[in-house]
Image (spheres, rainbow, N blue to C red):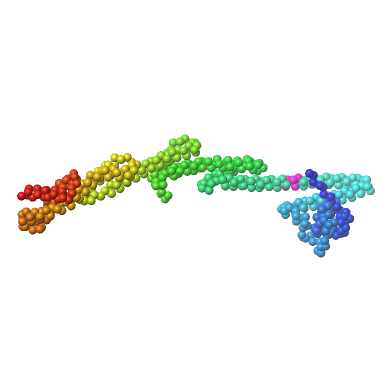
Amino acid sequence: MAKKATVWYTLGEAEKATGVPRTRLDHACRVNRLTFRRSETGARLLSQDTIEKLRKDGLKAFPRPYDPTGAPTEAAQSAPSINPLESRRQHLEELKIQAEEVRAQRELDRLRAEDRQSTGQQGNEALGRAITEKRELERLKIEAARIADARKEKDREARAERRRRQWEMTWTEYALNLVPQDAPRGLALEVRQAAVDLLRPLEPDQPSQLTERLVQAVAEKTLQPWLRAKEIENAIAEASNQLPFFAKNAYKPTEWEARATRAASDAIAQLECNAPLARIRAAANEAGNRIRTECEAWRTAEDHRQLCQQLVDSIFLVGSTPEAVRDAARAVREALDKLPIGTSRRQLERSKDAALAPFEAAARAARDADQYLAHVGNYIERLDTLENGPGHFEGHSERRRLAQQIAKAIRPAVIDKLRQEPLDRDDGYHFIEELVDTRLDAAD
């Protein structure tokens, strides 16, 4: 839609339109209380907006006389902020052009008046000079317009350059925000340089969605090697995480964790350089599962060994000699070693009891034999009293010594007899007495 042209009023027309005296309007323009512009003849002109405002509000009184340094008008205050030096230069150029226009117009009017009075050669020459001056004025106006256009073009280029720098900084910062926090610092510099190289041939006017996709693509391409290496590290770490709880340590890696890490690394190293991450994770996972299986098998074997050792260490034979206990432990160990790893505790205990049974029987027989052998002393004392009469043995100490010797000598025979068959009290004493009699007869 075309912009509506502005209507301008001379001070005389403004006086008729608003009712404000021309002298007050002229004074208000001189002290910058009203916004105006100059006509080609130098007359002050007021815009339609100013006339409407004067019709509505009138011209308020102002006590101060003409003050060249007075405050600018309302329109001047609302004008866009520009460089003061540049504004003053433009104003001076405009004043210069206007002054030249006024001077040329006055001279032209004067010459025309003289020409009407005299048609002589002097008038023609003056008219020629006026025409020449007017042409020079037109040339100056064209040159001023050219300078103004060049200045505007320079300002436009400067604004475009500032806008482009701001545009590049914005998207470069966006690319840096795509770098993970745990990435090396040098990687951020690579992403920034890649973003700068990408944006250099592009135009800021292209759609932001397209620029965003391009920046994301170049950032991902730059980060790809580091992200791939990190994914491989995570796959290797995940291999050790598959180990059972007892095989891991939160403070220091265990031997099993080290083995799982080495196995996963070796499995990945056997793949081609550009292998997909899915294959890398699968290879590391397979290696971790293999080490976990080995770890669980080792733990099962270790638990079996410790359980067997506990069963062996728990052997206790009352009344047996240390040699007998060692023989019993050796027999139990041999019986347990014949069983496969993973055998239940109940089955191991049964095997232990079966291997220990003969030794327990011998120990039990030895305990019973010791009880029966206590009868040796009583029997010898009775023989000394009843059969041979008092004094056959020289005192109590001699009988005790003889009883100990005979008990020690016949003890193996008593144990063998008890292992073969159980004896009650009377049968046991009778068997002891027979052995004692045999030993005494042999001594005689």
| Magenta run includes residue 167 | no
Q: Residue farthest to the right?
A: 117
Q: Is residue 416 left or right of residue 6?
A: left
Quadrant holding the N terminus? top right
Q: Is residue 117 left or right of residue 244?
A: right
Can residue 256 be seen at all in this image of the molecule?
yes
SS assignment for the magenta stretch, majority: helix
Q: Closest to the observer: 147 or 231?
A: 231
Image height of 226 relative to 76, above or below: above
Q: Closest to the observer: 79 or 128?
A: 79
* Span colored in magenta: 146-151
Q: Residue at x 36, y 44 (%)?
A: 299
**Number of numbered markers:** 0
Q: Is residue 299 left or right of residue 161?
A: left
Horizontal and vertical percent position of residue 126: 88, 47
Can residue 305 be seen at all in this image of the molecule?
no
Horizontal and vertical percent position of residue 326: 23, 47
Q: Residue at x 82, y 49 (%)?
A: 6
